[in-house]
């Protein structure tokens, strides 16, 4: 198969291509198809007649039939039992004598299933009529064939018209489909649990693990998370919001008519105007977007409608006092993308039997095989996998994969550059930078890479640059080798960064930069003095002094902090003659809260105030009053990271 980059614009599409090529082999050899028919008919409390023979096509493995208004007596609604039920079921058995038959009734809604070689896993109903009455509602039936699960939901939704009609019908559908049944674990469930990661394939097929984009895991309603494919059908009662409907029918403008269908508008996310509750007046208010959002139609489809409205029928035409509508529908949703459907027929059957026309859909749908039946195909795919993977893998070339910094000095910034190219003819690449030094937390803020992501989405060869920065800003980075990774959807490329030596002795360094830095210290602080109460002004002036001396490679933040630690705090202690401080036993795990009470025992109020101000400057925060606040905001941070207990010990001796 020839590949063209213009058809593969992203890594998702390349992954999808890979997976579909693998799955195609399974489908060609092992995936089967289930032929089935769905029929929905509001019979308006009529008894069965010969017309039903023409509604069921022969030769299908599965028939799912929803009959609405079988009986609407009070007894039927309360008990979900009536004599008509047995008549309808017996008629289906006569037409399909070789099929097994099950049925379930909710008020006037009767769901009949005739099948061969499939498993009925669960059936349950939800009543949505006023006060929980069963005059409206739905029946859910879960059907499993080999390793594929289908959901068929037969409904009779609210007939409420006007602006609140779609909202009520959406609410009915939401209530019908939100219940999560207890079902046996299947391949479908593993797909959901693994969220398309490919792990399920290892469990069932022993495939090599890949990042799969084959399955589209949107936030489905709870009911749909257990199935591969879902069907919703019946007298859904969604209306056409156009009072010129009959004229459009006479003019043959069916496409114009469908623009005002409530269900199509929601599936396609369109707006429409509502007619008033008597179905015949002029347009009223604009549709409220919130009215139609309780049931999520995202992902639902309907075969294009090529038949006339199915309601309200009167004789051989429509009731002139009612707006005709497509009340009787079949919509479906693909949950897992390896299960596809082919619709052969979607039509209505004109009849004078009821005020509704029956609607039927005849289709074929994929059947995922039981894993044990696939071993020969899987083995063939596994042999082809490595070759196919190499065809799709971007060809990433680096100008170098090892960088060495012989000596890194405290407060300096070092950088290096790596050129990156992707020379593959069509595969695109998105490279993410992954830091692989979780065990060396200290390196995370001192070794940085820019940019964090390189995206190759064009039709030309990718050419990018990666910048590596080393900035020794803490006194804990050790010499050694650190690793970062460039990772795309198929491969990982390691880059080694070696630091030969780390020099923390910044104040006695004799190199030119540090000489100029000391000159900046002397020029500013000896001339102006250090004022505790104007620390931020001092910082700004110090930055200016550093810049004027062109110490570009030195971080003023780091140097200023070190200057305060080694010079000012030591000078403060000497001037205050706090010799007793050096006698305090300070342990490595002590926090500010632990240390401060020991200071209180040997310092007078003025000394404590001065020391408080120094600590605040070291923290880079504004001065706050009160020892408790100092303890709270400083905590272990000051003495463990910014000053460090060990550093404090050195300064106090």
Image (cartoon, rainbow, N blue to C red):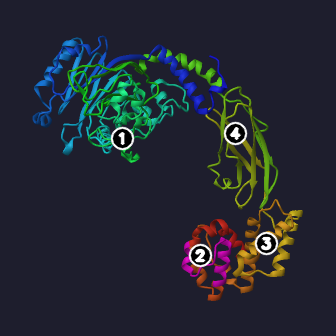
Q: Nearer the viewer, residue 197 or 407?
A: 197
When the figure is inspected, residue 28 is found, relative to residue 333, above or below; the finding is: above
Cβ atoms at labels 1 and 3 below 8 Å apart: no
Q: Position of residue 109 (x, y in %)?
A: 21, 30
What numbered label is drawn on residue 334?
none
Q: Position of residue 194 (x, y in %)?
A: 46, 35
Q: Could you tell me how far apart the alpha carbons at marks 1 and 2 are, in whole angstroms?
A: 61 Å
Cβ atoms at labels 2 and 4 below 8 Å apart: no
Q: Residue at x 74, y 49 (%)?
A: 480
Identify the image quadrant of residue 570.
bottom right
Q: Nearer the viewer, residue 255 or 641?
A: 255
Circle 2: is it few (<14), some (14-19), or many (20+) Cα within 10 Å? some
Query: Would residue 231 be seen by someone viewing this image from the given angle?
Result: no
Badge 2 marks a residue whose secondary structure is helix
Left or right: 221 as drawn, with respect to 54: right
Q: Name the residue that disc number 3 marks.
A: 542
Left or right: 378 as drawn, with respect to 516: left
The N terminus lies in which quarter of the figure? top right
Eye-nearest disc, 1 or 3: 1
| Residues shaded magenta | 609-632
Q: Position of residue 390 (x, y in %)?
A: 65, 24
Q: Could you tell me how far apart the alpha carbons at marks 3 and 2 are, in whole angstroms?
A: 31 Å
Badge 1 marks a residue whose secondary structure is loop
Q: Name the residue that disc number 4 marks.
A: 494
Left or right: 615 as drawn, with respect to 560: left
Mark sitting earlier along the chain (2/4): 4
Q: Name the residue that disc number 1 marks.
A: 295
Q: Is residue 610 magenta?
A: yes
Mark sitting earlier along the chain (4/3): 4
Q: Name the residue that disc number 2 marks.
A: 595
Cβ atoms at labels 1 and 2 below 8 Å apart: no
């Amino acid at each position: 198969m020839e590949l063209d980059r213009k058809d593969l614009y992203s890594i998702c599409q390349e992954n999808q291509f890979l997976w579909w090529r693998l799955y195609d082999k399974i489908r060609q050899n092992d995936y089967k198809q289930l032929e089935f028919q769905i029929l929905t008919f509001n019979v308006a409390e009529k008894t069965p007649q010969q017309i039903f023979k023409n509604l069921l096509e022969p030769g299908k493995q599965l028939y799912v039939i929803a009959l609405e208004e079988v009986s609407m007596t009070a007894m039927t609604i309360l008990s979900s039992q009536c004599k008509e039920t047995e008549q309808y079921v017996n008629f289906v058995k006569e037409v399909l004598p070789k099929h097994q038959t099950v049925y379930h009734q909710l008020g006037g809604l009767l769901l009949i299933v005739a099948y061969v070689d499939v498993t009925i896993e669960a059936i349950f109903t939800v009543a949505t009529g006023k006060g929980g009455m069963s005059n409206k509602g739905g029946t859910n039936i879960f059907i499993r064939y080999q390793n594929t699960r289908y959901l068929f939901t037969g409904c009779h939704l609210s007939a409420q018209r006007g602006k609140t009609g779609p909202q009520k019908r959406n609410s009915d559908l939401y209530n019908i489909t939100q219940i999560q049944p207890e079902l046996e674990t299947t391949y479908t469930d593993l797909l959901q649990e693994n969220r398309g990661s490919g792990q399920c394939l290892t469990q069932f097929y022993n495939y090599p693990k890949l990042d799969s984009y084959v399955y589209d895991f949107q936030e489905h309603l709870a009911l749909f998370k257990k199935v591969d494919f879902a069907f919703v059908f019946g007298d859904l009662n969604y209306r056409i919001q156009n009072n010129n409907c009959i004229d459009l029918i006479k003019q043959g403008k069916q496409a114009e008519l469908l623009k005002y269908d409530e269900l199509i508008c929601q599936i396609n996310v369109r707006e429409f105007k509502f007619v008033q509750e008597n179905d015949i007046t002029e347009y009223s208010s604009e549709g409220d977007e919130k009215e139609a959002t309780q049931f999520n139609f995202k992902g639902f489809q309907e075969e294009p409608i090529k038949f006339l409205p199915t309601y309200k029928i009167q004789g051989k035409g429509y009731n002139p006092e009612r707006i005709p509508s497509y009340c009787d529908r079949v919509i479906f949703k693909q949950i897992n993308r390896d299960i596809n459907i082919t619709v052969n027929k979607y039509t209505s059957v004109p009849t004078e039997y009821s005020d509704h026309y029956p609607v039927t859909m005849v289709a074929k749908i994929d059947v995922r095989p039981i894993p044990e039946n696939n071993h020969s195909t899987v083995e063939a795919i596994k042999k082809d996998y490595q070759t196919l993977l190499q065809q799709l893998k971007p060809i990433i070339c680096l100008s170098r994969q090892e960088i060495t910094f012989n000596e890194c000095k405290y407060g300096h910034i070092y950088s290096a550059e790596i050129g990156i190219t992707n020379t593959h003819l069509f595969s695109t690449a998105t490279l993410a930078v992954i830091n692989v030094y979780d065990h060396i937390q200290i390196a995370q803020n001192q070794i940085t890479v820019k940019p964090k992501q390189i995206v190759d989405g064009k039709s030309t060869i990718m050419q990018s640059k990666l910048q590596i920065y080393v900035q020794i800003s803490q006194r804990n980075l050790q010499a050694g080798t650190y690793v970062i990774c460039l990772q795309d959807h198929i491969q990982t490329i390691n880059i080694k960064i070696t630091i030969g030596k780390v020099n923390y002795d910044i104040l006695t360094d004799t190199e030119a930069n540090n000489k100029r830095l000391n000159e900046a210290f002397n020029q500013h602080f000896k001339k102006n003095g250090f004022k505790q109460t104007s620390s931020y002004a001092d910082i700004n002036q110090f930055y200016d002094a550093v810049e004027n001396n062109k110490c570009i490679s030195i971080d003023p933040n780091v140097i200023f902090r070190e200057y305060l630690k080694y010079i000012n705090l030591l000078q403060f202690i000497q001037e205050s003659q706090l010799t007793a401080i050096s006698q305090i036993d300070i342990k490595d795990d002590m926090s500010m809260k632990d240390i401060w009470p020991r200071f209180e025992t040997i310092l007078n109020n003025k000394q404590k105030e001065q020391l408080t101000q120094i600590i605040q400057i070291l923290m880079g925060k504004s001065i706050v009053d009160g020892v408790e606040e100092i303890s709270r905001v400083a905590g272990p941070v000051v003495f463990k990271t910014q000053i460090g207990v060990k550093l404090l010990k050195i300064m106090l001796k």
